[in-house]
Image: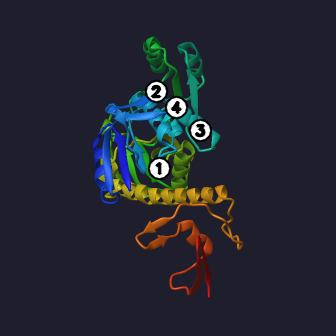
Amino acid sequence: MKAAVISLGSVSSLWTIEAMKKYFDSVTNIELRDTEINLGGKELEVLYKGLPLPDFDCVYVKGSFRYLLLLRSITNALYQKSYLPLSPEAFSIAHDKLLTHLILQHNKIPMPMTYLTSTVSSAKKILERVSYPIVMKFPHGTGGKGVMFADSYASASSMFDALEALRQPFLIQEYVETGGIDIRAIVVGKEVIACMKRKAVIGEKRANIHAGGTGEDYILSAQGQNMAIRTANCIGAEICAVDMLEGTKGYVVIEANISPGLQGITQATKVNVADRIAHYLYEKTKVVMESNKRDTTTKIFEYLDIKKDSSSSQQIITNLDLRGERMLLPSIVTKLSKFRDKDEVVIKVGKEIIEIGKC
């Protein structure tokens, strides 16, 4: 089986590629910035360094929100040709905090109370009725970037005045007091394979590792695991990091990350996350390929108007495969006849006719 990883070449991506080499026959490392999409043909075509991308059985696509349109286009082009653990929709949803919250709301997954506003004037009206402190976010951003905190109306209002020039919508979210601690769970398929508790450094409210936070192994409750798996499933991701807070009312989801860093959680949990991801990709690719083979066989049967369980004889038009003095029958004949190895048969041979039957 052939696999490819399309990414920005992060350490996490390189770890995953190396792990995948243990399972797949070949793994190709493709730089996302060297890919492009050809929209001029009959169908979307992915080009790599100007040439058509070869066929792969499995393609794992990763990248930051800055490449959202390219990521969405690549996965749209490949989704029917290869096994992809991330659906095209997953990139649009996970890279937009507003869309993520909308999906969580639709699927009744708990999250902090959140408001959306597109102007400073409307934002200030919301600020008059919320409880402080609050969290303010831009819809796009990762690693805790674009997240601000305000502990009063005055500080929040002054922040919005400064941000007015950006002319971007804002998310205003209730602050869940956790002592600067959040929880990150890595979901692979239908399982949480690793989970860590992250604690922010003194003077910092963001617990992200990239923001200086520290991580330690954490045993997530069954309720929390179910919430993380549901979150990944509803955004269309089989591989996903789900960030949660545990407050007085239980767990709430704050973010889903489909291109998570693996260094911090691997060090904190001692779980070889890259290998778990690689093994899952291999096993799932095998399942998908076998399913595709069955679908192809079914289509052949349907085309020939043959029922698998039919006991009546069928007429099949095909070319002969002669190997020296031997004649090989098409595999479909073997399936229909249900002959087994070492069956005793009677063969009647005449000019331009052969009949084979069990004794």
In the rendered view, tell whether residue 69 sits above or below residue 28.
above
Q: Which numbered disc covers residue 103?
A: 3
Amino acid on which disc 3 is placed: Ile
Specify which label sits upstream in the sequence, 3 or 2. Answer: 3
Q: Which numbered disc covers residue 83?
A: 1
Give the residue displayed 44% in from the left and 18% down from the top.
159
Q: Are marks 1 and 2 in contact (CB under 8 Å)?
A: no
Q: Which numbered disc covers residue 42?
A: 4
Amino acid on which disc 2 is placed: Asp
Give the residue displayed 58% in from the left and 20% down from the top.
128
Instruction: Where is residue 295? Give x, y as percent.
Output: 58, 57
Please name which of the two marks, 4 or 3, marks the residue nearer to the observer. 4
Q: Quadrant of residue 117?
A: top right
Q: In which quadrant is the C terminus drawn?
A: bottom right
Specify which label sits upstream in the sequence, 3 or 1. Answer: 1
Q: Quadrant of residue 210?
A: top left
Please name which of the two marks, 4 or 1, marks the residue nearer to the observer. 4
Mark 3–mark 2 distance (CA, rounded to whole Å): 28 Å
What residue sits right under mark 2 in the picture? 151
In the rendered view, tell whether residue 140 sits above or below residue 213.
above
